[in-house]
Image (tube, grey):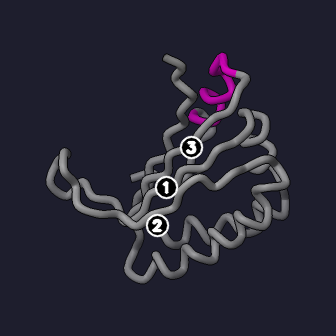
């Protein structure tokens, strides 16, 4: 299972016709002991993310699944708001942020990163 975005996935995001805020839904499954180590990545993000407009909306531990396949539980969920795709790409290219990205990759066995945009009804 993938942990980090592919170049093709990043390019597909760049090609989306949307200039407003994006919300990144992170579904996270940790290796043994990884949840505690992931906290270092969260602290790293809280230092570097706000410089690019990132807002950390919600971070929570996984819980009981009411609807879904058996075994489809996640250890944690994180929702991050970026002011735009440009803000998200800026953090990805920030050398200080990139220096700590291994803090994320080293702790995970599986992840889903889903980009969402506001749905105005």
Disc 3/disc 2 C-alpha distance (Å) = 17 Å
In the depicted view, which residue is nearer to us: 33 or 84?
A: 84
75 lies left or right of 94: left
User: Residue drawn at (17%, 48%), measured in percent from left and top?
Assistant: 69
Q: Residue at x 64, y 44 (%)?
A: 81
Residue that label 2 marks: 108
Element type where label 1 sits in the image = loop
Looking at the rendering, the stretch of residues picked out in magenta corresponds to 9-18
Residue at x 67%, y 64% (from the top left corner): 101
Q: Residues within 10 Å of mark 1 (few under 14, many from 20)?
A: some
Disc on res. 3: 1
Q: Earlier in the sequence, mark 2 or mark 1?
A: 1
Q: Is residue 30 above or below residue 93?
A: below
- Specify the quadrant of the image occupied by residue 18: top right
Locate residue 60, reporting x and y percent.
45, 63
Number of callouts: 3
Disc 3 + disc 1, Cβ < 8 Å: no
The Cα atoms of the two marked residues, 2 and 1, are separated by: 7 Å
Which residue does the image show at 18% across and 45% down from the upper left?
A: 67
Q: State the residue lying farthest toward the front.
A: 121
Q: State yes or no: discs 2 and 1 in contact (Cβ < 8 Å).
A: yes
Say left or right for 67 vs 60. Answer: left
Q: What is the x, y in percent for residue 66? A: 19, 50
Q: Is residue 103 magenta?
A: no
Please name which of the two marks, 3 or 2, marks the residue nearer to the observer. Answer: 3
Q: Nearer the viewer, residue 111 or 40?
A: 40
Q: Which mark is residue 24?
A: 3
Task: Please name which of the two marks, 3 or 1, marks the residue nearer to the observer.
Answer: 3
Secondary structure category for the residue under label 3: strand
Q: Earlier in the sequence, mark 3 or mark 1?
A: 1
Q: CA distance from mark 3 to mark 1?
A: 14 Å
């Amino acid at each position: 299972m993938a942990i980090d975005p592919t170049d093709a996935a990043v390019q597909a995001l760049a090609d989306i016709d949307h200039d407003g805020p994006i919300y990144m839904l992170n579904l996270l499954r940790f290796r043994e002991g990884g949840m505690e180590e992931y906290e270092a990545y969260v602290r790293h993000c809280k230092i570097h993310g706000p410089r690019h407009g990132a807002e950390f909306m919600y971070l929570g531990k996984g819980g009981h699944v009411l609807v879904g396949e058996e075994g489809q539980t996640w250890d944690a969920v994180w929702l991050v708001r970026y002011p735009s795709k440009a803000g998200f790409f800026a953090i990805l290219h920030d050398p200080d942020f990139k220096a700590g990205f291994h803090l994320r990759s080293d702790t995970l066995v599986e992840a889903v990163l889903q980009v969402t945009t506001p749905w105005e009804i």
